[in-house]
Image (cartoon, rainbow, N blue to C red):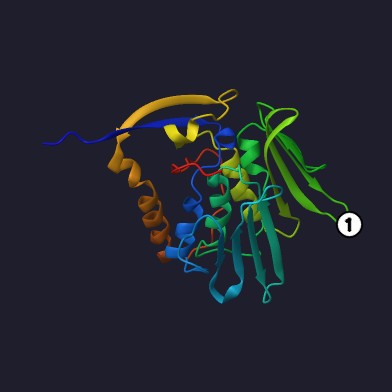
Amino acid sequence: MATPELVDQALVSPVYLAGPGNPTWVTVPLNTVSGWTALDASLFPHVVLTGPLSKSQLRLEPVLEGPWWHVSHRDGRTGTNWRAAFDGSTPVELIAAVTDALTHPGYPSRQTVDPYEPLRQAGWSLDPARGSFLSPDGRVRGSRNTFATSRSWRVTASLDEDDPLWHASLSASTPSIIVAAFFKALASPEPVRRSAEQMAGFPRRRITLDWERRPADHVARALPERVEQLASRRAVTSPLPAPAAGEGLAPAGRRFR
């Protein structure tokens, strides 16, 4: 019997310092499970995906300055119109939390939850009155602007005070169920997987890093298994549950910068 090929896998935590991961972790499920239409078949690196009835859109546009990822949703029936943007170094697990919540069969655009609850359960410092929060290690800061012309959520992850890794923003009209899903993924204690290639040259301070060797075919199955898991949600008819802290995240594939 042939010896299976083994590859190195890094287990990295916290997720918000793990590096971007593989964009197809987000784009492939939208296209193959949720029926979003791509302008072309590559799904990488310049991508525009449009949801059913053209209510939702994801754009991935690598640029020198500004966000790479843009997610938007418009629903004339409910009056919902929101958007989210993420820098290119934002871990794909965090972006996937938003798109997974949006494409859940029970997505309730009007359901209201406390978006801070996942952060509260994870021991983050909160000041809901001011709309601000801070991770236990001080690496992530968030705020909610309340100015009339710029009401939005703003999140920044940094290695050091003057060394930001990525920024994310969500418009003030973003449903609380979407914000809570993003915050749940942000505060997850579960490590995420990165390849040795992804970790080459990536800053390793401020993170917990463990290595393991896994069969290459098991690693290759990560994305198909994610697709299968999301496909199984199609039978779900109950409302989307409010996100809770502490649930694990599925592993990502190759890093993209």
**Disc 1 marks which amino acid?**
Ala
Extreme residue in the left direction: 1
* Viewer can see residue 78: yes
Q: Which residue was labeled with disc 1?
A: 148
Residues 27 and 124: in front is 27
Question: Which quadrant of the figure has residue 98?
Answer: bottom right
Residue 179 x/y as whole percent = 65, 51
Residue 32 x/y as whole percent = 42, 64
Residue 190 x/y as whole percent = 49, 35
Residue 209 x/y as whole percent = 48, 25
Answer few, some or many: residues within 10 Å of disc 1's Cα (few below 14, many 20 plus, some between 14 and 19).
few
Residues 225 and 90: in front is 90
Q: Is residue 241 left or right of residue 29?
A: right
* Viewer can see residue 195: no
Extreme residue in the top direction: 205
Q: Is residue 248 above or below residue 145?
A: above
